[in-house]
Amino acid sequence: MIPLPLARIAEITSGALAGMADPRAVVRGPVVIDSRAVEPGSLFVAIKGERVDGHDFAAQAIADGAVAVLASKPVEVPAVIVGDTVAALAALATAVCVDLPETTVIGITGSAGKTTTKDLLARLTARIGPTVAPAGSFNNEIGHPLTVLKADEGTRYLVLELSARYVGDIRHLTRVAPPKIGVVLNVGTAHLGVFGGKEAIAKAKGELVEALTSDGVAVLNADDPLVAAMAERTQARVTWYGRAESADVRAEDVTVDARGRAAFTLRTPSGAAPVRLRLYGEHAVQNALAAAAAAYELGLPVATIAEELSEAEPRSRWRMEVTDRQDGVTVINDAYNANPESMRAAFGALDALAGGRRRFAVIAALRELGEESAALNEDLGRLAGSAGLTGLFVVGSDAEPVLAGARAVAQDGAGGVPGPDGASSPQEDQENGAAAAATVRITHVADAATAGAELSGLLAPGDVVLVKGPRAAGLERVAAVLLEGDRQ
Ligand SMILES: Nc1ncnc2c1ncn2[C@@H]1O[C@H](COP(=O)(O)OP(=O)(O)OP(=O)(O)O)[C@@H](O)[C@H]1O
Ligand SMILES: [Mg+2]
């Protein structure tokens, strides 16, 4: 970060120095909200959360080397006292951005794929200049400014992920770090309940391109009508990406290999180059195209873009992590989060990867979908029920609509799981006749640990398991049980 004396921090945040803070003491970073991440030279920002209050860790932060604490009440150690520490964090990031005219800010938003696209684009921009991008998914009113504060005079590219829970959230983040390039991926149904409709979600995501000036570039998905409509809402020039022939940066001749990884020809206005992704799932093509279009606008040659995209491995955890166990069982861990679109993408990837192998899935009901929750979760159940699964585990006390949807389309083989060779018990054969192959055993379990334990007993060499649910369901624990002691 840019070194900032405490006096300057107090000025920027309209705060008051307290606790014998030395106005000349210099914060050199990092700025952190987790006291365990404090390093000598840090500024510790005390945030009062639902469960913990950062102010309780002020003394520890100073003991560990923090120069001061940004706090909303006196903490008996050197501090800058402000009214609202989250707002002060934004003010600091805003001031730092103003001091970095050489840094190009690129903002990425959308319902699914922000982190994946951010990781790809950061890899691309690193080829042409020092790049700062958040680790993982730092995309809200706290994570976003924390990332901005990592930049310094040497930073040429700041690649940021912007998320919205409410209309106005993204506008706020664009004021903190005004973007030169804005990338909008898609408008899905994530957080539908909070927003109350897809149009409201589109309104919120579009705030990113509304913030662009006429010398900026809006990178828009030509394949998503609600994103395409955002072209009307920006003063910036528009670059289109997608599968559509009209797109400036597009994928042609897309193929998917037996592992569910896509290859395609990347076509741009100045030439084409072959890309073979190491990321799983056909939806990764969209994210790769978005990153490619932004990089193309920044002047990267097509061959370099194609080369980097082909070398990129998944960077952020629990997003389509595919692991082969020594016994030949393949686990697809996509437990990071889920919404209706990413569920569909994950089952698509399962289909491509599994081919003729036995398939299992562990899922949990989607959340934050508001009035449409029951209907969308029944849709999810139907999707899972018709995915050619041998066994489906639905985790959690809110699983009923998913179970109902799955039972509606699948023959529930509650009597037992057919063997790996597809053979079922004689009794089942009698009951189900020729339909035995379509039988799926549907199991409702209370928690991730139970799902992991029960499924472990059913798996045989060659099986493929998809694990995916909303963040709160914590299904990565299922994958951990399945992979225990077996990572290759
Ligand atoms: N273009 C896409 N279409 C559908 N699903 C996608 C797409 N890109 C990623 N996904 C899936 O969405 C989930 C989240 O991916 P990722 O973390 O990249 O998205 P995100 O937008 O950053 O999510 P969050 O809002 O939770 O930060 C993963 O399960 C991933 O496989
Ligand atoms: Mg993310």
Image: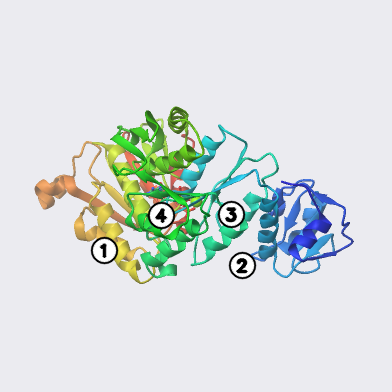
The residue depicted at 81 percent of the width and 65 percent of the height is 75
Count the numbered circles shown: 4
Quarter of the image for residue 110 reads bottom left
Contact check, label 4 and label 1, Cβ < 8 Å: no
The residue indicated by pointer 2 is: 50
Label 1 CB-ligand 1 distance < 8 A = no
Q: Which secondary structure lies at badge 3?
A: loop
Residue 28 as seen in the image, left or right of residue 393: right
Query: Which amino acid does the dot numbered 2 rest on?
Result: Glu
Between disc 3 and disc 4, the foreground one is 3
The residue indicated by pointer 4 is: 338
Q: Which secondary structure lies at badge 4?
A: loop
Between disc 4 and disc 1, the foreground one is 4
- Place of residue 99 in the rendered image (x, y in percent of width and height, measured from the top left): 70, 50
Residue 484 seen from this side: no
Vertical comparison of 327 with 89: above or below: above
Q: Which secondary structure lies at badge 1?
A: helix
Residue 39 as seen in the image, left or right of residue 199: right
Quarter of the image for residue 419 reads top left
Q: Nearer the viewer, residue 279 or 414?
A: 279
Q: Earlier in the sequence, mark 2 or mark 3?
A: 2
Q: Earlier in the sequence, mark 2 or mark 4?
A: 2
The residue indicated by pointer 3 is: 178
Name the image colouring: rainbow
Label 3, label 1: how many angstroms apart (C-alpha)?
47 Å
The residue depicted at 72 percent of the width and 54 percent of the height is 35
Q: Nearer the viewer, residue 162 or 20?
A: 162
Label 2, label 1: how many angstroms apart (C-alpha)?
34 Å
The residue indicated by pointer 1 is: 404
- Place of residue 45 in the rendered image (x, y in percent of width and height, measured from the top left): 72, 58
Query: Which amino acid does the dot numbered 3 rest on?
Result: Pro
Q: Earlier in the sequence, mark 3 or mark 1?
A: 3
